Amino acid sequence: MSGSDQPGLDEIEAWFAGVVEGRVSRDAADRWAGRWYTDDSLEWDELSSWAFRLLYGIDLRAGPVEPYLFDDEEVRGWLDEFRRRRAG
């Protein structure tokens, strides 16, 4: 899940699913999304942009020992919404 080509919807979905399934840390997903989302030379479709805005910040906490701002249920909901939007 980390090539040098601009990621498509399959790869974005894989990162969401990885976080939901516990295979990918929130920190790793945030760093991955930030690398792509902040690259001003790239253009994103609406769904990709929406998903990157969620993934980039998925590891935010109110404080160093506080829970995540977005709980696991909310992240699962994002993945479900991503899949619904993608199916069109």
Image (cartoon, rainbow, N blue to C red):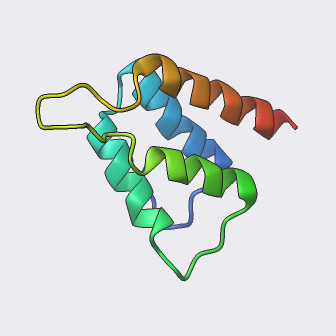
Q: Position of residue 69 (x, y in %)?
A: 35, 32
To which quarter of the image does residue 3 belong?
bottom left
Q: Residue at x 30, y 41 (%)?
A: 60
Q: Is residue 19 left or right of residue 25?
A: right
Q: Is residue 51 left or right of residue 16?
A: right
Q: Residue at x 25, y 25 (%)?
A: 67
In this rendering, the answer to whether 47 lies above or below 39 is above
To which quarter of the image does residue 19 belong?
top left
In this rendering, the answer to whether 28 lies above or below 35 is above
Q: Position of residue 64 (x, y in %)?
A: 12, 37
Q: Position of residue 83 (x, y in %)?
A: 71, 31
**Is residue 8 visible to us here?**
no
Q: In this orientation, which residue lies closer to the viewer: 46 or 61?
A: 61
**Is residue 10 visible to us here?**
yes
> Furthest residue to the front?
62
Q: Residue at x 36, y 48 (%)?
A: 30
Q: Residue at x 30, y 30 (%)?
A: 68
> Furthest residue to the left?
65
In this rendering, the answer to whether 73 lies above or below 16 is above
Q: In this orientation, which residue lies closer to the viewer: 56 or 65?
A: 65
Quadrant in which the C terminus appears:
top right
Q: Is residue 39 left or right of residue 42?
A: left
Q: In this orientation, which residue lies closer to the viewer: 61 or 18?
A: 61
> Furthest residue to the bottom?
41
> How many numbered callouts?
0
